[in-house]
Image (cartoon, coloured by chain):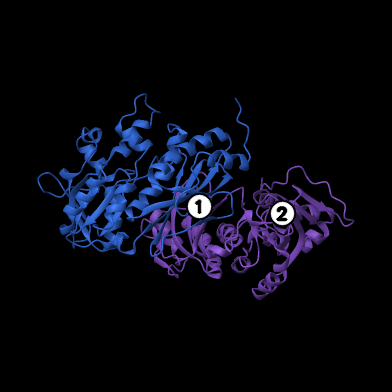
Chain colours: A purple, B blue
Amino acid sequence: MATRKPSEFQLIERFTSAFRLEGRGVVAGPGDDCALTRPKAGHLLVSKVDQVVEGVHFTAAFRPEEIGHKALAVSLSDLAAAGAVPRWFLVAISLRDGIGAGFVERIARGMSRLADQSGVTLVGGNFTGGAQLSIAVTALGEVKPKEALRRSGARPGDRLLVSGVLGEAALGVAKLAGGRPRRLGRSVLAQLVPVPRVALGQVVGRHASAAVDLSDGLLADLGHLCARSGVGATIDRAALPLGPEVAALGPEGALLGLTGGEDYELLLAVPPRQVASLRRAAARVGETLTEIGMLDERPGIRVLDASGRPMALPGSAGWEHFR
Amino acid sequence: MATRKPSEFQLIERFTSAFRLEGRGVVAGPGDDCALTRPKAGHLLVSKVDQVVEGVHFTAAFRPEEIGHKALAVSLSDLAAAGAVPRWFLVAISLRDGIGAGFVERIARGMSRLADQSGVTLVGGNFTGGAQLSIAVTALGEVKPKEALRRSGARPGDRLLVSGVLGEAALGVAKLAGGRPRRLGRSVLAQLVPVPRVALGQVVGRHASAAVDLSDGLLADLGHLCARSGVGATIDRAALPLGPEVAALGPEGALLGLTGGEDYELLLAVPPRQVASLRRAAARVGETLTEIGMLDERPGIRVLDASGRPMALPGSAGWEHFR
């Protein structure tokens, strides 16, 4: 069955019909030149754009709903790392030939489900043609000035805590390389439908001194945080919370936990006196945090093995998605 | 000379170095997970994402600086149509192989020049790989609630006024089809470096009842405004302000003025008692407005020729950029 090329108007109709377009603070959503929204007085506006691209962040193994979910999830994860309450989002979609309105509607459905769970409202967007499918999401949120988390706020002595488990999304890439498996295990699901830590993001600002979300891998993102804060870090390899399928791989699994990207967990720097209260606040929103090391004044990142000796680290800690 | 593939970090460094990163209301710009900005109390946040894609919105005839300019211009134009003061913007860039850091820096320089002229500050962005060069810009602005312009506010009896001249950008596409000409005339420049009506956008909200920016062509965008406002329109063809190169084409030029896209002028619906004061306000910011018709209760759009007879209109008024 041939896919008739839908008009931009049809695409907008099909896409927006999957969303609840009324939300708190929304004065005008899709349909005008711009969105009009009402920020809370005295709050800072938090904004982030992120983009997922066919062949880089998703492949033919992804269902359209999963592409939509992931496109929104990666931006919401950034807002969580800023300690923000996510409010609104805009979507710019570039479509290649062969992607019809039905596919677009399924992208929208996956995105809409996560939007409802996260309390964010679609307020604008844009469709254009192109050579490949790509989706850029701009997420907008709010935060009280004192609770805004930056990468630069960490201090020597802060403890390093991480949400969830590590390495699963990277293992999922390997498992998806041969196509979509019949049975989707934890790692494949972590890659297909990563869960942004939205509720956790709304409580960390009162306790942490700095945060970053893990998109490039623990070592790479910790490196960004250390560089911006002017600190170094020591990690206890045995403390890393690896997913069960990752842990089963042994030393190779530990490496995935250190360097694998796209976990979208939160890495938090927390003053020692705040650790217990942060754990209680996290538990109230159903999240568990694992302490994996601490920050110090010595530049660089050291990973200690089970006997307390520094491990040799891979030269490049950067994560390259599907590349 | 081969282009060495730059790292994401190098790209961000080169790109952001072209911009002034401090601006009013900016608490944290590029370098963190999110931008933090301080909206004015009691103002609405105005947001819009727009995307330009290689082969669709620009071709090899464009210099990198012009690509950067155009990518920002199209979003600022939307903010102007909302009556907003533009404040901040975010940029998501997808780069194909063969585009190096030098090209990216030139994109940034063109964008930065327009940003300075328009009073907007870069606060965030994202780079990713892909099959083609595309740039999505999310522009953020502010507007007093009473001065926010929507497409839906027009009423029968409102006069239709348009800024600048029409049809030049579309004629520019034709002139660029054979490559970049030696001497760049008005039409080619209108296509390469469209000027968003930023200053005009900040005065129209006190006078107009509705507005739209002309990206798809006069008939198409007027159609959107009429549909959202539940009105019809009558246009006087002889009143259309055509660019000199467009007017020289005769009837074909008039058709370009009616249907050609990417002029990025503002089309305003204005209550009759507000027309004179709007013209004075526009003159104070150096802009001239032309009255081209009026809105009425009869659905649809009619274009009257010099003798007052309705013209036959092209079946599809949609503009397809470089397609």
**Relative height, residue A21 to residue A75 (above, below):** below
Under mark 1, the amino acid is Ile
Do labels 1 and 2 touch, CB within 8 Å? no
Give the structural element (helix, strand or loop) at label 2.
helix
Question: What's the chain of the residue with tag 2?
Answer: A
Residue B56 in view, yes or no:
yes
Q: Nearer the viewer, residue A162 or B309?
A: A162
- Specify the label residue A218 is tagged with: 2
**Relative height, residue A82 to residue B248 (above, below):** below
Give the structural element (helix, strand or loop) at label 1.
loop
Drawn side of residue A229 relative to residue B293, left or right: right
**View extreme (right): residue:** A307
**View extreme (left): residue:** B307
Q: Nearer the viewer, residue A57 or A79?
A: A79
Q: Earlier in the sequence, mark 1 or mark 2?
A: 1
Query: What x and y, as percent, mark residue A65?
Result: 56, 61
Q: Are marks 1 and 2 on the same chain?
A: yes
- Give the quarter of the image for residue A236: bottom right
Q: Mark 1 highlights which residue? A: A99
Mark 1 burial class by Cα count in 10 Å: few <14, some 14-19, many 20+: some
- Give the quarter of the image for residue B34: bottom right
Under mark 2, the amino acid is Leu
Identify which residue is drawn at 31% across, 51% down. B201
Mark 2 burial class by Cα count in 10 Å: few <14, some 14-19, many 20+: many
Q: Nearer the viewer, residue B313 or B154?
A: B154
